[in-house]
Amino acid sequence: MSIAELKQYLSAHRDDDEAFSEALGELITRNRGAVRYPANLSLEDVGRIVREKLK
């Protein structure tokens, strides 16, 4: 399944805990190389990160 198909599957099966969990696990596994940032970053930090990425 492509990432787009996995996202559609997640949307269609959001009430099926087992199916949702399995599909979400697959999606996360495929994206292991992604940089993850904490949710509580300040606006200044977000701006700095965006500027660095744009360089």
Image (spheres, rainbow, N blue to C red):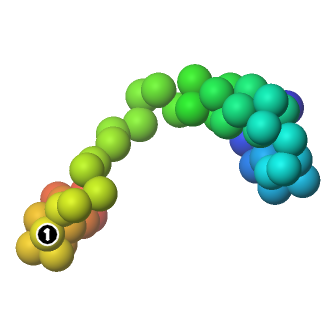
- Is the residue 26 above or below the residue 14 in the image? above
Quarter of the picture containing the C terminus is: bottom left
Residue sitting at x 20%, y 67%: 46
In the image, taking residue 18 as reference, residue 54 lies left or right, namely left
Residue sitting at x 47%, y 26%: 32
What is the three-letter code of the residue carrying label 1?
Ser
List x then y, in percent, for residue 23: 75, 33
The front one of 18 and 23 is 18
Quarter of the picture containing the N terminus is: top right
In the image, taking residue 55 as reference, residue 21 lies left or right, namely right
Residue sitting at x 33%, y 39%: 35
Q: Is residue 40 visible?
A: yes
List x then y, in percent, for residue 19: 83, 33
The front one of 15 and 6 is 15
List x then y, in percent, for residue 5: 84, 44
User: Total number of numbered labels?
Assistant: 1
Residue sitting at x 25%, y 50%: 38
The residue carrying pointer 1 sits among few (fewer than 14), some (14 to 19) or many (20 or more) residues within 10 Å by Cα, namely few
- Is the residue 51 above or below the residue 14 in the image? below
- Is the residue 38 above or below the residue 41 in the image? above
Q: Can residue 5 be seen in this view?
A: no
In the image, taking residue 19 as reference, residue 41 lies left or right, namely left
In the picture of the structure, the residue carrying the numbered disc 1 is 42
For label 1, the SS is loop
In the image, taking residue 38 as reference, residue 34 lies left or right, namely right
Q: In which quarter of the image is residue 22?
A: top right
